[in-house]
Image: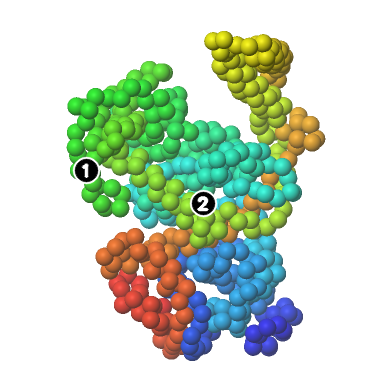
Amino acid sequence: MGVATTRSCERLLAAMGLLESAPVAFELVDDVPLGGVLCALPALLGFGLLRHTRSTFSLPNGFYPIETIFLVLAFLALARIGSLEAMRYEAPGEWGKILGLDRMPEVKTLREKIGLLCRDAERTGQWSRTLSQEWMAGSPEAAGTLYIDGHVRVYHGQLTKLPRRYVSRERLCLRGTTDYWVNAMDGQPFFVVTKAVDPGLLEVLRQEIIPRLKAEVPNQPSSAELEASPRRHRFTVIFDREGYSPQFMAEMKAERIAVISYHKFPGPDWSAEEFARREVRLINGEMVKLDMAERGICLSNGLWVREVRHRDERGHQTSILASDYINHLDTVAVGMFARWCQENFFKYMQEHYSLDRLVEYGIEPLPDTTRLVNPACRRLDSQIRSQRGQLARDHSQFGALSLPEKPDAQEIEDYELKKGKLLQSIQTRKEELDKLVPSRKETPKHVLLKDLPEKDKFSQLSTAKKHFVDTIKLIAYRAETALVHIVREKLKREDEGRALVRQVLQSTVDLRPDSHQKTLTQLSTLGHFFLATRGFPRNF
């Protein structure tokens, strides 16, 4: 039967196909390792972990109920167990007590169950989309201002040669997949769009994110309300300089969507007299004093927008462009500055939820009509940059050559030799550039995947299981954040909230089930803090 299996009859019936699923029954036990994850159970259920399980997914008859698979994945994320393989080093019987079974599934079994749940990728995507809509509807004020940014998941495997892209945290061009995340102002995630071939932030916004937001963001003004108030907008999107585009801002203004971004070409500094000291409330509630100024500015395409600038103590000015013509400049500035909440979300999810870890090893074909940068054009571009850099270096060395006031014969000979070599190198590089530049002009910048040489073709990483597990991680992150909000009410230092919650989730507990009252009470030294705090019940 396996290690820690005590329900032999039920497992035998399941093996014969005579058991739909084993009943969940908790036992009175003490000192259950990692039992603190049960503190997050009400929040997990509140954010929809099991709300659409039966209506969206199905599993064949077996020992483990379908709800157990979702709970295992959520609890593993909260307990900081980075991968499914790491379950091999966990005590299966102790985890079984947390799940109300004799033991947790084996890695092989869990992978099989995930494969069955994700056999229909469209269904998994619809489940994730439904949860995103519910999260937005549950906090319409947060969905009114949305942060959008790309995050590169670096791939070091050998199954396929993904295109290279610049990874800012590594300061290198590495192979990987780009995920475009949509988050609320406080960093809470809504959904993600994955791109094996990255067309750029603007194209992803135009083709996928903006149409989806127009359909899903709650409390948007009606057409009559938009006509009555020409400056009113549906919602606001915020992104960094990668999305700077006067044309895109004009397109969004026509759609009645406000855009806030950094100015990519801010020009000269404004005079210090224009700035006024203002008291501003940040997204975390902290009150700070900032030097702010505002002007109207006409962009290159004739679009008038607001330019808000912040001047720090060193005199450096940060320029922000906004097509939000209603809100105060404080709101515009705070919205742009709070974009770092999304960066903190990326960092936290990488460190604590293994966001970039692969769930399965496999590849999927890309459509032949996928449009991408021509590798031949990219190679020519790299060669031209290299030749130009070396040519500039040769020119610099040639200009630095000089003779002393009274040179001897040997110094004159060395000087002429070096000068001749540099002149020859400069001439050679110019001739090479004269060949490369026209060749690059004749080479198309973009091609279809089907037109690539066989050696340059590639596939995309399998996405269905990754999307499924990542969605559960988002639910776990939201549940953890809900606990953090409760904890911060009792702490003097707000930044200690997540550290305390992580400690509680990884604590050892005593379980006290009551079958008559249908309650499960968990007791632990750290757990008492949550049980005594308003917002979550003592018994659940």
In this view, the residue in front, 538 or 227, is 538
- The front one of 55 and 366 is 366
The answer to whether 111 appears left or right of 514 in the picture is right
Q: Relative to residue 45, is residue 419 depicted above or below? A: above
Quarter-wise, where is residue 291 in the image?
Answer: top left
Give the labeled residue for mark 1. Answer: 289
Q: Is residue 506 above or below residue 420?
A: below
Report the residue at 48% width, 85% height from top. Answer: 31
x then y, percent, for residue 254: 40, 27
For residue 250, the mark is: none
Q: Quadrant of residue 7?
A: bottom right
Residue occupying the point 25% across, 52% down: 286
Is 341 on the left-hand or right-hand side of 364?
left
At numbered mark 2, what does the secondary structure look like: helix, strand or loop? helix
Quarter of the figure with the C terminus: bottom left
Nearer to us: label 1 or label 2: 1
Which quadrant does the N terminus fall into? bottom right
Upstream in sequence: badge 1 or badge 2: 2
What's the residue type where badge 1 is placed?
A: Lys
Q: Residues within 10 Å of mark 1 (few under 14, many from 20)?
A: few
Relative to 319, say whether 358 is above or below: below
For residue 129, which numbered disc appears in the image?
Answer: 2
